[in-house]
Image (cartoon, rainbow, N blue to C red):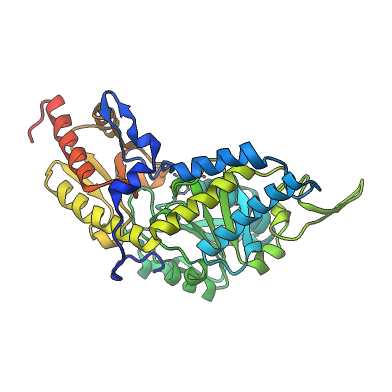
């Protein structure tokens, strides 16, 4: 696994008190209580260094990229392309040219659905997904299936929330063109065995797309070791800005793909009748890009590297051990997903047997605790679990064990509000 789920290597522990000082929003009070931000799987907060990098860009170097002949434009281009190099190193990508900037994970996946799959997937072909996918990695393939007449197949989960890898042979065959699955489940926390699945997919000639929206925030990601063909993620879930996304693809695969969007920046030559395309990655980046967001993304990678991705993973395991232990003390709570703290990212998806998840979310908010309640854009998974919704508390680098206790206290309080036994 390239997320070090065993976390066996001793690394420096995160100094959470120090980390917290870097995040101005954590000084806020919500309903008169200190903010406890446990909605990190939806989006994380940003440190000063990211906010400053973006505002410095606008204050000192703002210009459009690639086509200017003046110094500001050169500086902006260097900053934009410098961010691409940082992402490439962060993901251990084979080349900087294989990093494409998009708007978010959703757009990265749609790019592959349009620019790769529409050329390679025909009637009678199959795409393998899993029942735990976020709608972002489901709906684009449904649209493709409607258009192309291909078939969608699904790998199921077992009772512990793991994919049923022993059934992989039954759902993969010579018709499978693509296996598209999440690295880490946003609703269960399960970390999937990507290299094992990629090996099986490649053995039948299928390509592998990994939805890394929840993978990148939670530990070192090495796209080459994962052995996938595409890896998509949203920097806003790992301390970066909203509004920029990343797609890594194997260089040879990207090179033979069609463009996604047409317009300026992505062409080599244009006549009135036709056009030829720029080299990758620019072939996939039509129009003016989000330069300041790329600069912020670069700063977020610097920050994560300073903390150390292995240390982040160890912090998560520590949170998980404590969180799962504390939640097990509440007999009225069902906690979904793997029970081994090493086997999941630091989120807990749960239900009180008497209180609706939305009510829990509202009561916790009164205590200053931000969690998410709902289907987490994974409606098929909710159906598979037999629930309409869950409450989800997701932790990150600035959350500490004390906040786990505050969450548990508030879950007791919710029982009191409804006059239920504890
Ligand atoms: N996949 C997963 C697993 C996610 O958790 C999310 C965000 N909730 C997405 C995809 C979509 O990310 P975005 O909205 O940034 O495109």
- Please tell me in which quadrant of the rendered image residue 160 appears: bottom left
- In this rendering, the count of numbered labels is 0
Q: Nearer the viewer, residue 42 or 355?
A: 42
Q: Nearer the viewer, residue 205 or 242?
A: 242
> For the C terminus, which image quadrant?
top left
262 displayed left or right of 157: right
Q: Residue at image x 53%, y 55%? A: 232
Residue 263 coordinates in the image, percent (x, y):
77, 44
Residue 114 coordinates in the image, percent (x, y):
66, 52
Residue 42 coordinates in the image, percent (x, y):
41, 41
Is residue 109 at all visible to an observer of this figure? no
405 displayed left or right of 196: left
Q: Residue at image x 21%, y 49%? A: 323
Is residue 416 at all visible to an observer of this figure? yes
> For the N terminus, which image quadrant?
bottom left
Q: Residue at image x 64%, y 60%? A: 121
């Amino acid at each position: 696994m390239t997320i070090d789920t065993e976390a066996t290597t001793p690394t420096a522990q995160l100094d959470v008190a120090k980390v917290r000082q870097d995040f101005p929003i954590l000084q806020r009070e919500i309903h008169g209580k200190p903010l406890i931000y446990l909605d990190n799987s939806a989006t994380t907060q940003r440190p000063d260094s990211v906010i400053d990098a973006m505002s410095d860009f606008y204050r000192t170097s703002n210009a459009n990229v690639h086509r200017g002949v003046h110094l500001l434009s050169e500086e902006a281009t260097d900053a934009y392309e410098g961010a691409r190099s940082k992402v490439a190193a962060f993901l251990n990508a084979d080349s900087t040219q294989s990093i494409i900037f998009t708007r978010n994970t959703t757009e990265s996946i749609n790019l592959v659905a349009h620019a790769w799959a529409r050329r390679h997937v025909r009637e009678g072909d199959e795409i393998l997904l899993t029942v735990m996918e976020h709608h972002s990695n489901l709906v684009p393939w449904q649209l493709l299936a409607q258009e192309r007449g291909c078939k969608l197949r699904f790998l199921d989960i077992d009772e512990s929330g793991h994919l049923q890898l022993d059934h992989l042979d039954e759902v993969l065959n010579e018709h499978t063109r693509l296996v598209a699955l999440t690295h880490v489940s946003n609703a269960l926390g399960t970390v999937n065995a990507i290299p094992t699945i990629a090996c099986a997919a490649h053995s039948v000639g299928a390509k592998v797309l990994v939805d890394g929206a929840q993978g990148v925030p939670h530990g070192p990601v090495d796209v080459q070791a994962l052995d996938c063909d595409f890896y998509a993620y949203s920097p806003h879930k790992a301390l970066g800005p909203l509004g920029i996304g990343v797609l890594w693809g194997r260089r040879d695969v990207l090179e033979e793909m069609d463009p996604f969007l047409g317009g300026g920046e992505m062409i080599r030559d244009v006549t009135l009748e036709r056009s030829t395309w720029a080299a990758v990655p620019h072939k996939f980046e039509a129009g003016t890009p989000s330069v300041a967001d790329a600069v912020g993304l670069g700063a977020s990678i610097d920050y994560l590297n300073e903390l150390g991705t292995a240390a982040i993973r160890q912090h998560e395991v520590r949170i998980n051990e404590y969180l799962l232990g504390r939640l097990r003390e509440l007999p009225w709570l069902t906690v979904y997903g793997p029970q081994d703290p090493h086997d999941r990212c630091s989120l807990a998806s749960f239900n009180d047997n008497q209180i609706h998840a939305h009510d829990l979310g509202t009561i916790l908010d009164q205590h200053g605790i931000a969690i998410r309640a709902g289907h987490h854009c994974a409606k098929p998974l909710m159906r598979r679990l037999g629930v309409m919704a869950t409450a989800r508390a997701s932790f990150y680098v600035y959350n500490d064990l004390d906040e786990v206790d505050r969450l548990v206290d508030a879950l007791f309080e919710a029982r009191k509000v409804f006059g239920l036994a504890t």
